[in-house]
Amino acid sequence: MKRKLIILFVICLTAIPALSQQEPVFSQYTMNQFLINPAFAGSEGFTSFNLTARQQWLGFEDAPMTQAISGQTRITKTSYVAKSRSVRKRTKKRRPSGKIGLGGYLYNDQNGPIGRTGLEVSYAYHLFVGDGQLSLGLSLSAYQFRVNTSELVTADENDPLLSQARESMFIPDGSVGVFYMYQPFYVGLSAKNLFQAAIKFGGDNSFSDYQQVRHYYLTSGYKYDMRNDFEIEPSILMKTTEAFNLQVDVSVKGYYKRDYWLGFSYRTGNAFITMVGVKVDKLYFGYAFDYSLNDIQRISYGSHEIMIGLKFGDSNKRYRWLNRF
C-alpha cells in the first residue's frame, strides 16, 4: 500500500502544481484565445497560424513544458448546394456564407513523468446580434496519455506494480465554448475536458484511477483607442475547476500603432508577468516572462513563453462582414 501511495503522490504532485495543472498554462492568451475557447475559431475573420512554446520554471528539473501549433479560418465565400438529386432538374440554392469558423491544433504537453500529445479540431458558428457577434464553438480531441514509469521512484526497484502499469493510453475528449464580441469589447466562456476521463494505470482494481478534471475559462477585455497611435487593453482570465480551484490573470497591455506592445499581468498567488511583442507585416512575435511569487523562485529562473503568429485576410473586400464594426 505504501508503494502505491508513493506512485500516486508523485503523479498528483506533478499534475497539480497550480490549479490542478492538467491543462497547459498560457500567459499570452489574448494573442490566441482559440487555444482555450473553440468558439474563437474564425471570429476575427482572419486566417491565422500560431506557434506557441512554453517552458515553465526554467532550472527546475522535470518542470512543465508545452508546444502547440494551431490554425483557424473563417469560411466566407458564397457557396451553392444542389436542391434536387435529379441531374436534369438540378437547381442550385444560395447558402449563407461567412458564418462558419474552422480550426485545429496539435500540441505536446509534458509535466514531469506525465505527457500528452494530441490533436483537437473545432467548429464554430457565428451569429450577428445587433452590432455584435455571438460565436458558438465545439471541439473534439484525441490524445495519447503517457506515464514514464522509469522516472517513478519506489522502495522496491522490482515492484510488480510498475511492471503491470500501462505507460500509454489513447483518450478522447471535447470542449465547448461561447464568445461574444462587440468591438472593442469581448467576453468568452469555455469548458475543457468535458468527458472527465478516468485513466487506469494498473491492471487490477487495486490501482486507483487518475481523473481528468473539467476546466472552465472566462475571458473578457476591452481595447481602448486613445486616438494618438496608442491603445490600451485591460483584460481578465478566470480559470477554475468544479472543485472551485480559482485562479485569475489580471492584465493590461499597451499598443503603439498596433505594431508594438508591452503588457503586464498578475496571476493570483502565482506569478507576475511581463509581455512584449512586435508585428512585422503579417507576422507577430510575442514573448512573456513569468516571475514566480512562491518558493519555487529560489531554484527557478522563471517561466518563458514564445509566440509566433501569421495572419492573412485583413482585406475588407474578402471579409465584408468586418464592415459591420
Image (spheres, grey):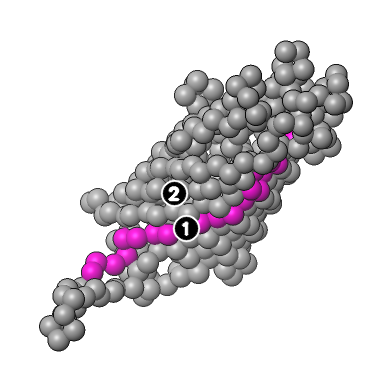
Picture layout, residue 99 above or below residue 115: below
Q: Please give the residue where the numbered disc 2 appears in the rendered image.
A: 139
**In the picture, which quadrant includes the C terminus?**
bottom left
Q: Earlier in the sequence, mark 1 or mark 2?
A: 1
Amino acid type shown at disc 1 = Gly
- Taking depth in this image into account, of 221 and 179 the one nearest to the observer is 179
Residue 5 image offset from top left, x and y in percent? 72, 16
**In the picture, which quadrant includes the N terminus?**
top right
Picture layout, residue 44 above or below residue 20: below
Residue 157 image offset from top left, x and y in percent? 87, 26
Contact between labelled residues 2 and 1, with CB atoms less than 8 Å apart: yes
Look at the image and say whether residue 208 sits in the magenta stretch: no
Crowding near pointer 2: few (<14 within 10 Å), some, many (20+)? many
Residue 52 image offset from top left, x and y in percent? 64, 52
Element on which disc 2 rests: strand
Task: Say left or right for 58 vs 234.
Answer: right
Residue 113 image offset from top left, x and y in percent? 74, 35
Q: Which residues are magenta?
A: 95-117
> Does residue 306 appear in this view?
yes
Picture layout, residue 262 above or below residue 18: below
Task: Say left or right for 258 vs 297.
Answer: left
Task: Say left or right for 80 vs 207.
Answer: left
Amino acid type shown at disc 2 = Ser
Look at the image and say whether residue 109 sits in the magenta stretch: yes
Which residue of the protein is positioned furthest toward the left in this rendering? 89
Q: Please give the residue where the numbered disc 1 appears in the rendered image.
A: 103
